[in-house]
Amino acid sequence: MKKSNLAGWKDVFIFTLTQTLKSKAFLVTYAILLVLILISMPLVTILTNRGTEDPNAPSPIEKVYVENKTTLPDMDFSLLTNQEAFQNISFVALEEDYKAVEDRIDSEEQTSVLLTISEEDSAYSLAFVKAGSGPVKDRSLEQLGSATMEQFEAFRIQALGISDEQVTLLQAPVTTAVSLTDTEGNAIEKEDTSISFNEYWLMYGILFVVLMVNTMGSTQIATSIVTEKSTRVVEYLLISVKPLALMVGKILATLIAVLVQMVSMVVMVFISNRISAGLSEGNGTSLLSTYLPKNIFENMNLVNILFCFLLIILGFIFYATLAGLAGATVSKLEELNEGLTLFTFTNIIGAYIAIGALGTLIGSGTNTFVTFTLLFPLSSPFILPGAILIGKATIPIVAAAIVLQIIFILLLFKFVAAIYETLILHTGNTIKLKELMRISKLIQKGGKVNE
Amino acid sequence: MSLSVKNLSKSYGEKLVLDNLSFEISEPGVYALLGTNGAGKTTSLRIILGMLAKNEGDVLWKGRPLDPVRTNVGYLAEERGLYPKYSLLDQLLYFATLRNVPRHAAMDRIKHWSDRLMVDEYIFPPKTKKRAASKANRADQLSKGNQQKVQLMAALISDPELIILDEPLSGLDPVNTDLFKAIIKDEIQKEKYLILSSHQMPTIEEFCSDITILNRGRTVLQGDLNQIKKGYGRVNLFVKSDVDIASYISTFGLPIANKTPSEYHLKVRDEKQAMEFLTKLIGDNIPIIKFELREPSLHEIFIEKVGDNNEEK
C-alpha cells in the first residue's frame, strides 16, 4: 500500500461527513432516536408509578375475619398493625356462619375481608375473600396477603418450638466445592470467574449496540460506493484520488457520524435516567439503578472507556472495509443485498461467537473458548468492550486483542488495496468470493488484471 | 512534445480490447479518437487517465509518466455522473477541492461557468421558503443536457492543461451543441491540449488536426487529417443540373456513390477524368448548377476503414 494510494482521503472524508450530517434521512432518524431515548425512561417511570400506591399508605381494609382450620393454635395477627399501612385493621376470629359473613362483606361490609387458613396434605393454605366491588382492590389484598404470610411463617415456626438460630441454619443453602490440591495436599484456590445475570445483560446490550453500529454504518458505506459506481461519479473521482483513498475517507466519515450518534445517545440515556429519577415517587431511584447494580460500573474509568471505544472503532473499520469491498463487487443498488452476503455472514458469525462466549461466561466463567473469543478479531469488538467494563478482561488480553485487530485490518487493507482498483470500475454481474480470490492471486503473481 | 502514448495494450482474459495504441500530441490543439461503439476509445482514455491498469505501454506527459492526481487534467466521462441527491454547488466545490483548487478560486470559476453555460439558476437557486425550490439545486432535478453542462463545469473547474472529453456533444440539442463547441474553441485558443472522442464526424473535422481511428481495439488509420484526405485525392464529384445527365454518367462509366432528386455524388478515378466529364457537359451545352470536386469526408474515410475491417473479421 503506497502512501500516494491514500492521497486525497481527507477531502473525501470532509465531503462525506458534511453530506452525511446534512442528509435529511440522517437528521430525521437521529432526532427520532434521541427523542425516543429521552422520553423512554420518564415514560416507563410515569407508567409504573401510576399503578403503584405508597406502600405506607393506609390500607382500605378495616376488618379481617380469621378462620383457622388448622391444628395450629389460634394466631394473633394484630402484630401486623405495627406496620403503618395496616394500623387501622382489626383482626377478629370468625365466630359466625362463614356464608353469612361472606354475604355481608359482599353487600354491606365491603371494607372487610375473610381469611381462611387451612391445612391440606402437607401444606398450609391462606385464602382471602373480598367483596366483588368496593374500596378493597386486588393490590391492597396482595399487600396484606404478603404481610400475613410472613407473620404466619413466624407463627408456624414458633409453634414447632424452633429457635431463630435453628431457622437460620435450616434455611442456609447447601453448597458443594471440588478443590484441586498440589502435591503436598494443599488446596489450590480456583477463582469464580462467572458473571452475574446483570453483567450478562450489560455485555449483551453492548454487543447488540456494536452489532447495530457495524451493520448500519457498513451498509451506509457500501450504499455510498455503489451509488458512486451506478451514477458513474466514480469515474470523475478516480482522476483525483485512488480507490483506496475513497474508501478510507468514506469509512472514517461514516465512523465519525456513527460515533457522534452513539455518544449523544449514551448522553441522552443518562439525561433520560436523571429525568426519570426526578419523576419517580418515594426515594427518587432512577430506572438504571433499579436494573443495574451500582458495582457493575466500578471498572468504568477513562482508560477503560478509551479501550472500549478503540476496540469498537477498530471493529467498525474492519467490518466497514469488508462492506466497502462488498459494495465494489456490485454495479447496481438493487444488487447490493447480494453483494453484502459475505459481509453480513462475517458480521453475524462474529456476533454469534461472542453470544456463545457470553453464555459460557455466565455458566462456567472464563475458559479457553472465552479467551479465544476475546482475542479473535471477528468477535472481540462485540464482547471485549463489555468484558472490560465489568472487569473480566485483563490488560494483556486487551492489548493482544488490539494488536491482533490491527494486524487483521492491515492484512484486509492489503487485500482490498490490491483488488479494489480493479473492482471499482467493474460493471456487470456481482463478483463472487472465488473470483475475488482469483483476482488477488493474479495481482500477487504480478499478472495482468482484468476488470 | 507534451503527451505521448506508446504501445498501450489491454486485454480482458483472452480478449484483446486495445492493441498497441500509440500517438503523440506535440502542440496544443485537439486530438481525435474515433471508432465504433466498443472500438476501445473509452478504454484508451481510462488507461491514459490511470483509471484502468494497462497490460503494456506508457503514457507520458511532458516526458514523465502521466499521473492524473498531480497533472492538471480535466475529464468529461462518456457516462455522465453526478450525485443525484447532493447540492450541485457542494459537488462542484468538492470536485474542485479534489483538484486542489482553492475555495475562492473555485467559487469564481463556478460563477463564471454557470453563467456561461446558463445553469446559474440551478447552482445558485433563489432563496425561497418553498420546499420545491430547495430541491432545485440537486442533480436529479436537472434535465440530461443541464447535467451534462454541470459535468463540463466539473471537468474545467481546475482550468486544466490537458482536457479529455469523451463524447462531449452526445445528447445535446443544437443550441447547447453550439455552446459546447464555442467552449471547446475557447480552450483551443487558450492553447490547451484536448483529446476528443466522438461519433460526430463533422465536429471532429471542425476541431481536429490529428486523428486515430480505432476498430476493435486496433488502430486502422492515424495521422494528420488533411494529409490523410490528400492521400485519398479529389475523387468525389458532386454534380447538379436542370436536365438529366444519367446518360453522360453512364457513357463515362462513373460509379454513383449517392443520388438525390437534383444532385449526383459520383466517384472519379482522378481530377483528369473529372475535367473530361466537365468538358463534355459544357460542350453539349448542358446547364450545370453545381460541379464540385473534393476530397472524401472524414465520415466516408471512417466508413471505408471501419467497414473494411469489420468485413475482414
Image (cartoon, rainbow, N blue to C red):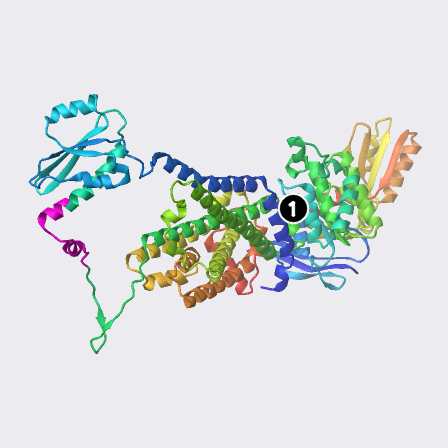
Among the 4 quarters of the image, the one containing residue B176: top right
Q: Nearer the viewer, residue A327 or A18?
A: A18
- Residue A98 at x, y percent in the picture: 11, 27
Among the 4 quarters of the image, the one containing residue A377: bottom left
Name of the residue lying farthest toward the bottom? A184
Q: Amino acid at mark 1?
A: Asn
- Residue B220 at x, y percent in the picture: 70, 52
Label total for image: 1
Name of the residue lying farthest toward the top? A107
Q: Residue at x 22, y 26 (%)?
A: A131
Q: Chain of mark 1?
A: B
Q: Residue at x 15, y 54 (%)?
A: A170
Q: Residue at x 55, y 39 (%)?
A: A28
Q: Main secondary structure of the magenta part?
A: helix
Name of the residue lying farthest toward the left? A71
Give the residue number, with chain letter if any, for mark 1. B310
- Residue A336 at x, y percent in the picture: 50, 45
**SS at circle 1:** helix
